[in-house]
Each structure stands twice: as structure tokens, then as C-alpha cells.
Amino acid sequence: MLQTISETNKNFSNEISQVSDLKQLENLRIKYLSRKGIIATLFEDLKTVPKEDKPAVGKSLNELRNSVQTQFDTLKEKLEALSGNNKQAVDFTLPGRGKSVGSKHILIQTLDEIKTIFRGLGFSIAEGPELESDYNNFSALNFAPDHPARDMQDTFFINKDYLLRTHTSPVQIRVMQNQQPPVRAIMPGKVYRNEAISARSYCLFHQVEGLCVDKGVTFAELKGTLVSFARQFYGSGFKYRFRPSFFPFTEPSAEMDITCFLCKGKGCRMCKQTGWLEILGCGMVDPNVFKNVGYDSEKYTGYAFGMGIERIAILKYDIPDIRLYFENDLRFLKQF
Amino acid sequence: MKISLNWIKNYVDLSGISSDDITDKLTISGLEVEDIEDKAKLFDNFVVGYVKERKKHPNADKLSVCIVSTGEEDLNVVCGAPNVAAGQKIAFAKIGAVVPNGGFKITKAKLRGEVSMGMICSANELGISDDHSGIMVLDPSLPAGMPLAEALGLNDVVFELGITPNRPDALCHIGVARDLAAIFGRKMTLPEVDLKEIEEDINGAASIEVENTTGCPRYTAKVVKNVTVKESPEWLKQRLVAIGLRPINNIVDITNFILHEAGQPLHAFDLDMLKDHKIVVKNAMEGESFVTLDSKERKLSAADLMICDAAKPVAIAGVMGGENSEVTPETKNVLIESAYFNPSSIRKTAKRLILSTDASYRFERGTDPNNTLYAASRAAQLMAELGGGEVLKGTIDVYPQKIEPLKVNLRYARITTVMGFEIAEPDVKNILLGLGFTILSENKDSLDVEVPTYRPDIEREVDLIEEVARIYGYDKIPPVERIAIALEEKTDQSAYQDKLRETANSLGFYEMITNSLQPKEIASITGKTIDMLNPDSLDMASLRTSLLPGALIAVAKNLNVGQKDLMLFEVGHVFNKIAPEIKSFDDFSEENKIGFIITGKAQTTQWYEKERAFDIYDLKGLLSAFLDKIGLDNELKDLYTHVENKNFDYTFAKLYKDTVVGFGGAVSKDVLKKFDINQEVFAFEFNIEALKSIQLEPKRFKELLKYPKIVRDCAFILDRQITCEEVVNVIRKGSSALLKKVELFDIFESGNLGNNKKSMAFSLEYFDESRTLKDEEVEKDFNRAVETVKKELNAEFRGI
Ligand SMILES: [Zn+2]
């Protein structure tokens, strides 16, 4: 009898290991666990076992029944879960109920990144009007009247005294007129250029300028700050260079270049074979600008810089046509 | 501006320096190389060949077969030119050469049975001239095998330089050479003038009178007689062609050459065309017309400075000469004008006439007033040499008040203060001397520097510091990373609008940026436009007066490409005229706004829901969620009886106290038609400054409700015109303070209810912060509310 029990146990283990669906399992249950199944029959046979053997055989038989039942239950649970007995209730392949979240314009996202970096470097953020006076946009920034430097920026004039700002530098003037040094601020905003609209130029663009004025501010610090910004914004692995340039409101003036993203400095069409891409203009604030806002240029020095957001995003995201920014095709907006 | 490296080498010794090095150094010291044209590369695989033998082609009458020596080997070459002969030195294209004119590549070929291992070229094929009558025969002294580019002097590198407006001195070859001399520490050599003048005195041949000495501080003239106007010699033509100029004749070419050599624009007059051989420099008469060299008639203003003779204008000073006095092939006697004009006067004229020339470009940036005599003399000498002319004795030089060089003091310590790096004293001095500055005196702390008059941009100490730093090299100044300690309060004026953006995003709105410049008829739809004086195109004639038109343009654009369901917003400035003329910032308004626009389907058909179009209640709900998120939903009131607005079919406004802070509604069909939009559009615009200025109570924690809420529902049949708000107000009127919230949850009309009737169902919420309410007291309150509605609104209570 004990041997039969042991064999039954072995057979069951064998057979249950072959079961792969609920139907086979049900057959197995009928075979072993039903009222006329093998285990019930064995309990029937227990009656014929000699009295002295009964406790041992009975115990063994109970163990067999428990073991079979447990194995059966475990597998049943597993198979039910697998075969999706709840299939009619949940079809995970149905699309979820839609909820949509919008996004900021890619130019604003780029601006946000830049603002975050400069906030970390201790800069405030200042804004100002787009329709400006000629004085704030040019004269206060050391653009002499009738100087060809004014041709560097094609200007939309409202009349001889008012215009659409060509850079956010007038905000620098407004900040300095309202505050004594130290000043440490960036000025983001829209600026306008009176140019024909094409794939490469638009009549407006976004700019971020920065201004830092204090005792002991130097060109070396300007370099350090901008390299630190560029490393955070573009990532490491790029080389930077500063080369002399000209802006009426800074002296000395410089432009900052980064190794070309496309050719990594070897020279290609994008960088006009130079291996470098220009990313921003900068310089030490011209003493005439300080004079115009009432700062003492013997006591204070300062630096300023400015960059165009459209150009930065064009380089970073490989956008082929500047007009895409302003057409607001939802398919474009949703990409970012 | 184009600069030829070969040309520059006449003034500075650049031996041993590669053109790549020159390119880099020019750029990093401030003369940005925007493009490089390496002419020698065009003539790779072209050499000087020697025709050893020429015999007739056995199978073709017009061809010959030559043995050409390339110095290394003798090659069999078939040639079709009639003028090829043994003993000639010729331009030879080897296998692999690409012929500049036509761009075809030379390969080994068989012509009528004879092998040809290259090509003997004509000047036309080389792209050097139009001459295609035969092959180009070279100077017999050239050695066979010499690279052709070198033999023809075409081994030039031409730089396209981007010269900033502060550097008029660098707009010529001598100027660029001067920077290179300073950068590489090399010596400059300027061409010396050695004039052979004849006995006849210039004062008998011409006279100069300058009426406006402010506009023309200096006028220098030389006269050359008996010149022959003819083609320029090769070397001169080569110089001009290299920088993209077309040679005309020796006289004109010489003036162009001097301009690009020394930066001084010259004008050559036919002396015999000048009445009384006289020059008068004076202002034009208002409205006078004048025909310039390009045969165009120009209308002058009284501000324009003119060069006249005894009777008539002959040139627009510093801009362009006149047809009536230009040098022609018949010209015999030439008056050379070499003047210094006031930069701003020239600029005004050139701007007004929209006429920018090589001369005006330089004059308006500032030429060297003390270089006119040198330039005139050098031109006279070349005219004598190249045109066989005779230079009259002396010069007429009207220069009533000499422009003296500036003296500027430079402190070494100040260089360190500005740059944050100490540049050694000898370096400072060498750089300044190399650039042509004179050190007048010095002590241990500073230098007194005389600034040459070709550098009008250098006026102050800081200008000298830039000169020193740029030649020293910005890259040699190590960056200093200083951590700013924020002692002052940091502000962020953009933070509020950024919060609005993020809130709009969370509701599903995508941000757009539209053009703030619009055609006037578009911008006028929504306000009083401010117009541009000088727009490049009428598409950007006016500033937007509202965010609505730009948003509608974006909607139309999207509909066109099949994007029909849109939720968009924009943050931007809008501009409206207040006074008829803008004389101050009070005469117009510039407001920062946020505008929302929705159109199409709020819900497309899905497996779980039917499609539904956006309607005004979507707009209302979205705005309410938006305001709630920024803490303003309870602060603002809706106003539905806002003034009629032709741009909206129906409108509502948001009010703070009694001020409208936002406005919008369903955009009118008429407006939509203008933008070719044929679906409903809902739009709303808030004034950001108005929202921002609303003072909110600082947020404080509120005790969470400890006692249960009791909710009672009720429905009424009411006259159709009764609004939801009216019912809510009456319910509140009939209730005690225990009623905390009334919400509409169902509304419908049906025939069963009766004519002009509707059913509205409300949910009423009661609680008290300090105790549990008893059912009876709520019941009493609720019944009173129901009774009040029944009585005051003639409503029928439907229970629930
Ligand atoms: Zn590249």
C-alpha cells in the first residue's frame, strides 16, 4: 500500500509536469482528485489495511492528498492567470483613454535651459519693451549718429526717435539706469531686424544678453563665465575660442566660437570650412556706456554678451529653415 | 572685402609663413577670414610645357602631333590650334588636370589613331581671358615643368575678409599688411614715390576752391598731362582681377589700384571737361539732378556735397563721379582728386541716394586725412609710367586746418584691470609699434602714444588696450572662473509668464510664436496699428495689436495641412497707438499678453467616447482651470454683457474688481472668412501684467474638514431663458450659511417638459467646519431653498 502511494505521488508529479492548459489540468483533477479518482479509491482501500498499519498508511495517504491538491491549486492559479481567464474584462491592447499635455515652444525651451544655467551662475533675469527709443537702442550704447555701425543692424523705424529694438541691450541701459553696481543679469527677449524673410533670416528673433558690472570684473572672468556656460549647455568635448570683433557698446569686443558640431573641427559646409561655429558676441562694457548711465568707469568694470536663440536651436536640433519656428505647424510644435 | 596674398607680400615679408597660418592669425586677431580662394588649386596638374617637335597628323589636316616635354618626360600630344610650333613654351594640362573653363578632365585619348597624353591650352580654356584664337604662348624663358600657376603668377590665395565698421584702415592691402606685420613681428615696406615732374606748374593748369571745409577738410589734386588712355599692363590687370575687379583702362585701373593698395579713394577727371579747369567743392542745390558714371540720373538735396567745375556739378563728392567729366579713350589731361571727406556727410548722401560705392564705403568709415598727398603722388607717378603722361610741377592741396594725430595715455595697470591678465611691458610696446603707433614718452607706469590718423577708431585708453589684447591673442588670456556670491537680491521678471506657460501646457495647450509684424490690414482688425516707416516688405508693415490675428494665421496654416483640432497659446507683446503721433512712451501701449485659441474637436471619436466639437463651454472650463491653477479663479468675475465686439459672435470678459483683465469668445464668422477658416474658433486673451499685479493673500494651511458633508440633489422645470446663474443665486438666497456649494449637474430640454421649458438639476453641498450636521436641519435648509426657487422663478420642483 505504501508503495502504491509513493508510486501515485511519482505518477502525479510526472503527469502534472506535462500539463500545459486548464483542460488537461481538469482531466488530471478528475483522474486523481474526483470522488471516484485515484486518491478517493486509495482511501477506500485504506479500510482493508491491517489495523496496526493504518496510522502510518493513513498519514502517508493524507500527505499525498495534500501534496496533490497543493500542486493542483498552484498550477491552476498560474494557468488561469496566463490564459487570461479575465480576458473579457481587460484587453490591454486597447488604446488608453487619451489625455494630452501641451509643450512650450522649442525656442522657449532653449531659452529656459539658458536661463537655468545663468541663474545658477548668480544672474537675475530682466525684461523690457520691444518698441524702444532710438536713444536706448543706439545712442546710449555708444552708436554715434550716422556711424556705419548702425548698418550692422537693419532697423525697423517707427519714426526718427522710435524703433523696434534690434537687440536686448536697451534693457541693459534700463537696468543700469535703475540700479547701482553690482549688476548681474541676463535679458531675454524678442528683437527685430528689417530683413527679407527667407530660410536663413527672419524679421524677428530671440536673444539673450547678459551684463555683469562690479569692481574687479575682467575679460578673463568673461571668458571663464562663458566657457562655463557653454560647457553646461553644449556639453564637454568641444573646444572654444575667442576672437576680436566689434560692437559699439563693448571694448574690447570678441566673438566666441565653438568647434563645429558637424565636422568636429575638420571643416565642412556648415562651418564654411573653418571648423568653427560662432555662438555669441561679447566684450567689456565700453566706458562711454557707463558714462551714459552714470557709472564711474574708473571704479567699475563690466562685461556683456549676447546670443541668438534661433541660431543656437538650429545648430542643436538641426532645423533646416528658420521660418518653421514661426509657422506653428502643430506637427512641428509636437516634436519638441 | 577681397585681399590677395601675393599683393600683400609687396608690403610685408611673409616668407616662411603658410597661408593656413596667415588665415588663422588674421581671424583670431580681428580680421575675420570668411572665405578662402586658393587659385593655385585650380591649376593642379598644369605645367609649363616645351614643344620639342611638331609634325602634321597623318590622318587629319587640321591637327598636329607634338612632342611636349614636361621637364620630366616627353609626351605625344595631339593639338588642333593653328599657332602651335616647335620651340614654344606652352600651358600644358597633364593627364588628370581639370580644365578651368568647362570643367572637363584630361584623360589619355586617341585622336584619329594618334595617342594624346595631355592638352596644350588656350587662354580661354584656362579661364584667363576670352582669347580662344589659338594656344597661349608663354615667355620662352620659363623652365619646362614649372607649375603653371606659378609661371602665370596665379599661385595666389585670395581672402574674403569681414572687416568690422571700426576698421577702415584694414579696407586695403597696406592696412591688412600692417596687421600681419604686427602679428608676425615682420617689417613693413611701403612703395616709395619718386615723381619726375615737368616744368609746367599745376597752378597755371587748374584751380581748387573748397567752399564747405566741414564737409571736405582736405582736397589734394595733381595734374598729369598728355597721357595715353589704353589697356593696363598685365601686372596691374592681374592685381585687379585677383580681387574680382574688371580692368577698364590704365587711368581708371590706377585709381582702383591705389584705393585697394592704400585705402584712399581717388577720382580722375578729364581736365579738359572741367570748365575753366576749376574745381569747386560745395553743397548741391536742393532738387538739382545729376547723371552719375552709371548713366543714372540722381536727385540731389542741399545736404549733398558736390564736386563742381566753374559751371556745373561734375561728381557727387566721395560717392560717384559724373558722366560729364569721366576719363574716356580720348582723354589727354587728367586731374587726380585725392580728398578727405567728412564721414557722416558722405554716409548721409550715400544712404539717401541708396548708392554705396567702394569710395563711399571707405569715406563713411573714415579715411586717413594725412595720406591724400601720398596717394595722389603715387597715382600720378603710375600714370606717367603706364600712360606716358607728364606730371605737372607741384600739388594743389587745400587743407586749411590740419587734422593732428591724437595722443593717448596708456597705463599698464589698466590693461591688467580690464583684461584680468598682465601683459609684459615689452610686448605692449612691440605690438603698438608694430601697428604703426608712436611712443612719444614713457615712464614705469604708462606710455604716451600717438595714434596714426589712419586709425580713427582709437581715441581712448581702452581702445589701445583692445589693440594690445587682440594682437597679443585673446586665447593667451586664461579664463578665470569666479563664483558669484549673490549679495544682491536675485529677481526673475520672466518667472510669472513662465508659470503661465507651464499651466497652459498642463491643460493641453501647445505654445506658438507668431510674427509680431503683420500686414496693416490684418493688424488693424483688432486695434490701432503702429506702422513701420521703412519695412522691407508690406507683410511686416505694422505691429500686432492683439494676439488674435497671428493665432488665426497659425490656425489657417494648420487647417491647410490637415491639422484640424488645435489648442494653442502664445505669450507676447501687443502694441496699440494712443496718440496720433508717437513722441513718447505715453503715446502708445505695449502690453504683455497670453492668448488662447481652440478649434476643431475637443474629443475625436474613440472606442470609449463619441466625438465632440469644442464649444464656448470648453473655453470657459479651460480658462477656469487655468485661473484656478494660478490662484485667481475666485478673484476674477465673469462678465457676459461686455460691449459688442465685431470680431466675436459672442463674448465674455474676466474682471478683477472693475477692470477687464481678459477678453474673448467665439470668433466671428466674418473674421474667420478673412483667414479662410471654416470651422468654429474660440479665443481668449489675458493681460499678463494685470494678472500679475493682483495681490493674492499669502497661502496658509487650512484645517482639513473633520465633519461629514451632506449632499442633496434637486431638479427644476424652468422657463428656458432663465440662466444657471440666476437659479444658483436664488438657491443661495433661500439657504443658510450651511450651504457651501451649488453645482449644476444636468440640463436638458424636451417636449414633455412643455413649450420653452427646460430642466436643470443641481447638487447642494452642506457642512459646518465645527460640528456634524443633523439631517433635520439640512432637510429644513434644503426645503427652504427649493421653495424659494419655486416661488421666485416660477419653477416646478421635480424632486430626485
Ligand atoms: Zn564643420
Image (cartoon, coloured by chain):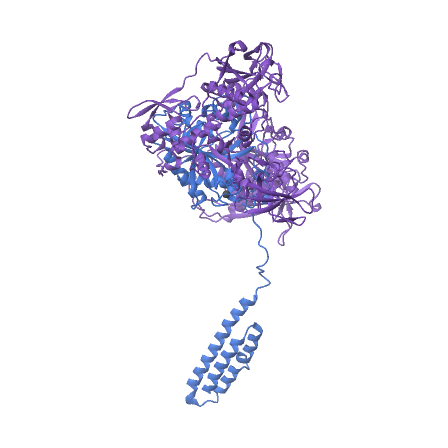
Could you say where residue B408 lies in the image, as x and y percent from the top left? 37, 22
Indicate whether B60 appears above or below A79: above
Picture quarter containing residue B754?
top right
Could you say where residue B759 lies in the image, as x and y percent from the top left? 64, 44
Depth order, front residue of B591/B31 = B31
Could you say which chain is coloured blue in the image? A
- Counting every numbered tag in the picture gives 0
Q: Is residue B37 visible?
A: no
Could you say which chain is coloured purple in the image? B
Depth order, front residue of A99/A204 = A204
Picture quarter containing residue A295?
top left
Indicate whether B399 appears above or below B184: above
Q: Is residue B369 visible?
A: yes
Left or right? Give the position of A51 relative to B551: left
Q: Residue furthest left?
A: B444
Could you say where residue B452 lies in the image, as x and y percent from the top left? 41, 22
Depth order, front residue of B792/B95 = B95
Could you say where residue A311 lies in the image, as x and y percent from the top left? 51, 38
Indicate whether A273 appears above or below B180: below
